[in-house]
Image: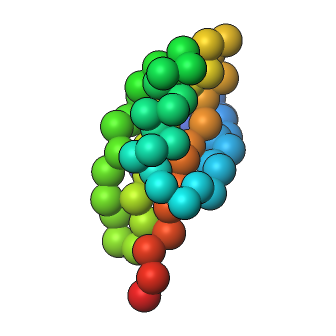
Amino acid sequence: MVPAEAPSFWLAYFTVEDVDRSYKAAIDAGAREIQAPQDYPGVRMAIVTDPQGAAFGLLQTRPR
């Protein structure tokens, strides 16, 4: 589903206890939002960039 001309990429995710709290701490420390915290089946996640522009995800799993 990704066009052939799209470059390959990867994204590191860090498992956290509370995505909303970790997201706020990252933003307060100078990170920029790419994706605000959202719920998906079984997880809550957000994506930010650090002040140098490196992107990373914050991931909180939900009990089944």
Residue 2 on image: x %, y %: 47, 42
54, 26: nearer the viewer: 26
Locate residue 19, reporting x and y percent. Answer: 46, 50
Report the front residue among 10 and 56. 56
Task: Name the spot of residue 39 as percent of width and height, x first.
Answer: 31, 59
| Residue at image location 62% in from the left, 57% down from the top | 15
Above or below 35: residue 54: above
Vertical placement of 31 versus 43: above or below?
above
Task: Name the residue at 54% across, 60% down.
Answer: 17
In the image: residue 28, left or right of residue 29: left
Q: Residue at x 65, y 50 (%)?
A: 14
Compared to residue 35, the image places residue 37 above or below, namely: below
State left or right for residue 59 relative to residue 7. Answer: left
Look at 34% across and 37% down and name the residue there.
Answer: 36
Q: Is residue 52 above or below residue 1?
A: above
| Residue 41 visible in the current orientation | yes
Q: Is residue 5 visible?
A: no
Quarter of the image where the C terminus is located: bottom left
Q: Position of residue 20 (x, y in %)?
A: 40, 46
Colour scheme in use:
rainbow
